[in-house]
Image: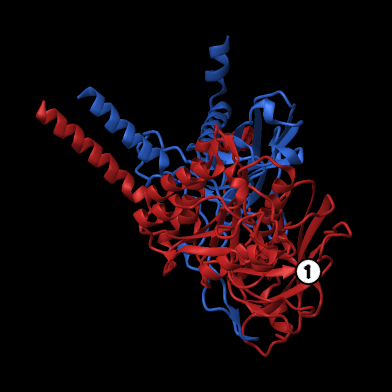
Chain colours: A blue, B red
Amino acid sequence: MRASLLLASAAASAVLAATAVPAAADGSPSPQPTIGTAGTSFLTATTVRPGQPVSVSASTGDYLYWSFATAAGQTGRIAVTVALPPAASRHGAATYTIDVFDGLRRRQACTAGPQNATAAAGTARVRLHCSLRQVRAWAEPWSDDPLPGTYYLRLTASGLPEQDLGLPIRADVRISAKDGDARPAGAKLKAPLSPAVAPGTTLAPGASPSGSASPVSSAPKPAERVKGWFSWPSSRWWWTIGGGVLAAVMAVAGYSLTRHPRRWFSALR
Amino acid sequence: MIFKRSSAGGGLLALLLASAPVAAPPVSADDGGPAEPPKVELVLDVSGSMRARDIDGRSRMAVAQQSFGAVVDALPAETQLGIRVLGARYRFPGSSKAVGCTDTQQLSPVGPVNKAQAKAAIATLRPTGWTPIGLALRAATKDLGAGETTRRIILITDGEDTCSPPDPCEVARRLASQGTHLVVDTLGLTLNDKVRRQLTCIADATGGTYTAVQHQEELTGRLNQLVQRAGATYRRTPEKVAGTAGCADAPTLAPGVYTDRERFSEHRWYRVSVAPGQELRASVSVALDRTLNPDHGVLLRAVSAAGQELVRGTDAGSGRTDVQSTGLRWSDQRTGADASASPSPDGGSGGTPVCLVVSNSFSAPAAVRTAPGMPLELTVDLVPSSDAPGEPDLGRGWLLLVVLAGTGLVAGLVTGWLARWRVAVWKEN
């Protein structure tokens, strides 16, 4: 009985572990299923929700892609551990790199790293980190600032002896996002930076496209952050109201100081 | 006890049900959705060298057959699998090259798989002949046919091509550059240097992967992963488009994803019509599908019809990578009077024509062929443009509190003095 129960639960967890897609959002804090796949290009990147563990077995030299959505004010952080093939089968040092791209495939800077590391021939694993810049609520079209939308993570063996290609590795990825105040305050990007993924059509010269791509045919979009109406757009409300009350109190105090100075100064004596 | 058992079963069922919608691939939610099932063709080398007993003490052929059985058993219901073998009929050495190098046959056509039949067909194979990889790749591409989803070939081999020319890598690059979107994943059953170079070349040319197999479970695991990947990531492949050498005759693109090919130092032009109030978003990836010099870069520019540069995106890199990509955003920020003052050059269809130019700074050693060009992926999107935010209406910070408190105090003092002065004046009168 117990054995069968164990088997059943093992089978269930195996099914859960094998699922490659984030669980439907139900708001419960239950642990999210581990993702066991990775894409091989921007278009096939596996979607990961922040906090969801990823563990993928791959071959040395594979280019592994994941995508995640980030909302305004959030600061993304990525931690990757690559378990390398046995030292006996390797021929030299290997360099691994994580690159982060925004929805327009523009390279994103890491504010803290290391985003690339070289493993000597004898080491068993490489650890990589990348803290992203805080996502802004709005930026000029000409700027490179991080904006809400899709982000792509690529894990690359950026330098290694050619003989070491194809050996088994395991990559563990952890993507997390820390919330914060979105800047500039009160600004909003009308459409998140989530690119279309459906094939396009060539138009007759001079024709203008009818409508934009439907929302389902685009890469993952960030959820709108849920906030109370009073805390929106920011804590500025509290500062301003507090300042007003303080000003009123000071005005009354100043008035009474001039009208009844004795009350104030006799108390001091 | 029985009650407990049933409740445990129910719990399991609930778990499975809960995970069922999770297991559905994300692309199934696509609008319209791809009507085609994922299509994969397995190309298995049955050449004489597969007799070698060097994988866990068993012959390469036996290992491949066992893994293949496991993969067929675990095959997702909707995946269509075809099987092709090469070198199964004519002995190597022993038969003439002319005959041996035409030796590839389809064991089962691409379609719903009869698992028992497929396994039986593979189980009866014996290592025999030559290794015409290039020919097998061509035939496999034909088997998979044309269509709008990615075609995947999984090539399992233990030897280099004994029939080149044609070089199988060149064949793979040619096949990938024409017709449908093709990905070749390769599995090498040996650690031989020549085999590895050939297979990594084929994989790089088509955006596939290369795996060196040393153990039975590695082969089974990797095969399963590749077949699952074909099921999870198949979707409608990008539209093929041919960019031109100038803005005037460039193809006009709607939002979506496109592919093209670009040679070294070539410029490819495309046109997008951006309506007022719209923002143009474009990104481009150029794939490094051959041996290139280590430093490279890609440049994407948006240029107005008059030839004025509007915005550019650029990225450069060095070392081993699969694609080099960049992107840009642009929206018409001119004020209304300004915009209406300049006449729309394309006859007032409502949109400003904007040209996108893709150029690259790749170079290759002299021996590397430059044709066909490198694969280029272009994403175009038009979204409502976002206006610059105004200054915030509210304040924050300690300085604000000091200023407000100080103003309040001064106002109170002044009011108090005024009141005292007025009382004094009133008393005098």
Q: Nearer the viewer, residue A268 or B231?
A: B231
- Measured along the vertical axis of the image, is residue A150 above or below residue A84? below
Q: Quadrant of residue B345?
A: bottom right
Give the residue drawn at x 38%, y 62%. B112
**Residue B229 visible from this viewpoint:** yes
The x and y percentages for residue B109 are: 45, 66
Give the residue drawn at x 44%, y 67%. B34
The x and y percentages for residue A103 are: 61, 55
Tag 1, which secondary structure? loop
The x and y percentages for residue B289 are: 72, 58
Q: Nearer the viewer, residue B54 or B285?
A: B54
**Residue A179 visible from this viewpoint:** no
Q: Nearer the viewer, residue B373 or B155?
A: B155
Q: Quadrant of residue A264?
A: top right
Q: Quadrant of the N terminus of chain B?
A: top left
Q: Which residue is mark 1?
A: B371
Q: Quadrant of the C terminus of chain B?
A: top right
